[in-house]
Image (cartoon, helix red, strand yellow):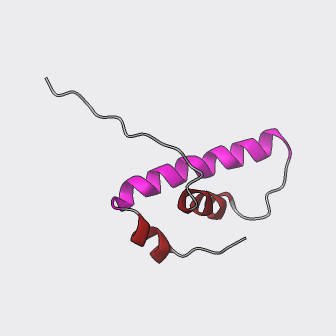
Amino acid sequence: MKRYTVEDLWEKVPNKYEAIVVIALEARRLARWAREHEVRLQEKPTILAIQRFLEGKVQYTKETQNQS
């Protein structure tokens, strides 16, 4: 698996903080999936989540709040 650095993330993402939240949620999802299926991951969930995010495998949408 290709290794990514934090600099790779900063180059590809306009909002760093939003990317961190999305990656954290994906890491939790991967860890929960591994526990539920009793599978041992080859990498830490955080590393896998960063790789999946940078490869475009993580889909997310941004919710907007209506200000009335």
Q: Eyeballing the image, is 39 above or below 62?
A: below
* Image quadrant where residue 44 sits: bottom right
**In the rendering, at what x and y percent does residue 9 appear?**
47, 68
Chain part drawn in magenta: 14-38
What is the count of numbered marks?
A: 0
Query: Would residue 8 appear left or right of 51 to someone viewing this image?
Result: left
Query: Would residue 33 appear left or right of 40 to someone viewing this image?
Result: left
Q: Eyeballing the image, is 17 above or below 36?
A: below
Q: Is residue 36 magenta?
A: yes
Quadrant location, the N terminus: bottom right
Q: Eyeballing the image, is 54 above or below 30?
A: below
In depth, the one of 9 and 28 nearer the eye is: 9
* Image quadrant where residue 54 sits: bottom right
In depth, the one of 2 and 33 nearer the eye is: 2
**In the rendering, at what x and y percent does residue 27 appear?**
61, 52
Residue occupying the point 53% across, 52% down: 24
